[in-house]
Image: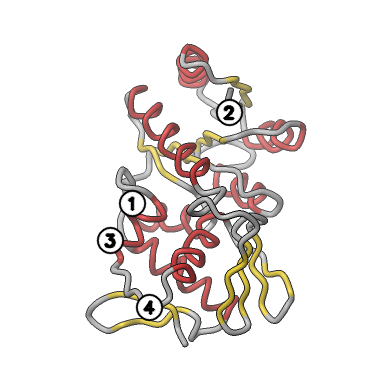
């Protein structure tokens, strides 16, 4: 049974979400604001966090940033903001998906299932056990979910790790932005391809600008 933390300051929405998720068999814990959400998260182990953006005391972006300092647990943001800038901010902080208010509960369930399914299917690649992939100074442990540069571990979010793994497992392939969205975020991802550019930019900062190169007019591939 997956355990979900719901951080939502609107009592009515929180109650509806909790009841609906429990009916679907999820173990649910709730928090009324960002401060309580951080406290609840630090107290327990969760499989997913459903996090409102606009909250008093501490907003959802700040909560997400704090979570990402210690965990790559899947996070879905609930927001009334539809602007691209706000969505890109969330993806830059490592969010897994967005749900825009008002929303249907069926949509919430489908998004949660999709995120959990992607996380569950990514633990082992092609049935490999204890597999380490190397490309120059970069090593990737597909089981331990670790990336090292010249033997030193480098911290990455879950989505960044999945992107690096995608390129290292297919070193000769050119991926379009749509290819990357489908492989890493899933076919049911709702957003735009700016998230790909931002994730690749952060990976280049950590592993060097030539680790992922741009193939003009086509997409991206692993550098040599």
Nearest to the observer: residue 208 or residue 100: 208
- Cα gap from disc 1 to disc 4, whole angstroms: 36 Å
- Judged by depth in the image, the label closer to the viewer, 2 or 3, is 3
- Judged by depth in the image, the label closer to the viewer, 1 or 3, is 3
Residue corresponding to mark 3: 178
Residue corresponding to mark 2: 4
- Cα gap from disc 2 to disc 1, whole angstroms: 27 Å
- Cα gap from disc 4 to disc 3, whole angstroms: 17 Å
* First in sequence: mark 2 vs mark 3: 2
- Judged by depth in the image, the label closer to the viewer, 2 or 4, is 4
Question: Where's residue 212, x and y in %?
Answer: 45, 78
Residue corresponding to mark 4: 172
Numbered circle sitting on residue 83: 1
- Cα gap from disc 2 to disc 4, whole angstroms: 39 Å
The residue that appears at 55% across and 79% down in the rendered structure is 135
Please tell me whether residue 44 is drawn above or below residue 139 in the rendered image. Answer: above
């Amino acid at each position: 049974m997956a355990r979900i933390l719901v951080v939502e300051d609107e009592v009515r929405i929180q109650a509806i979400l909790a009841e609906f998720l429990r009916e679907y068999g999820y173990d649910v814990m709730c928090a009324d604001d960002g401060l309580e959400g951080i406290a609840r998260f630090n107290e327990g182990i969760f499989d997913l966090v459903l996090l409102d953006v606009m909250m008093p005391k501490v907003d959802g972006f700040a909560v997400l940033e704090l979570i990402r300092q210690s965990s790559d647990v899947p996070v879905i943001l609930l927001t009334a903001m539809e602007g691209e800038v706000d969505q890109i901010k969330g993806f830059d902080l490592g969010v897994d998906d967005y749900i825009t208010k008002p929303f249907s509960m069926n949509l919430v369930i489908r998004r949660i299932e999709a995120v959990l399914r992607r996380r569950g299917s990514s633990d082992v690649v092609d049935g490999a056990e204890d597999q380490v992939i190397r490309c120059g100074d970069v090593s990737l442990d597909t089981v331990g979910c670790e990336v090292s540069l010249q033997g030193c571990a480098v911290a990455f979010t879950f989505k960044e790790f999945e992107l690096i793994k995608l390129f290292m497992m297919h070193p000769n392939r050119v991926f379009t932005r749509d290819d990357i969205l489908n492989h890493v975020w899933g076919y049911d991802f709702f957003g735009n391809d700016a998230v790909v550019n931002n994730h690749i930019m952060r990976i280049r900062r950590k592993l060097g600008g030539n680790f992922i190169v741009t193939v003009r007019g086509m997409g991206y591939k692993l550098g040599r």
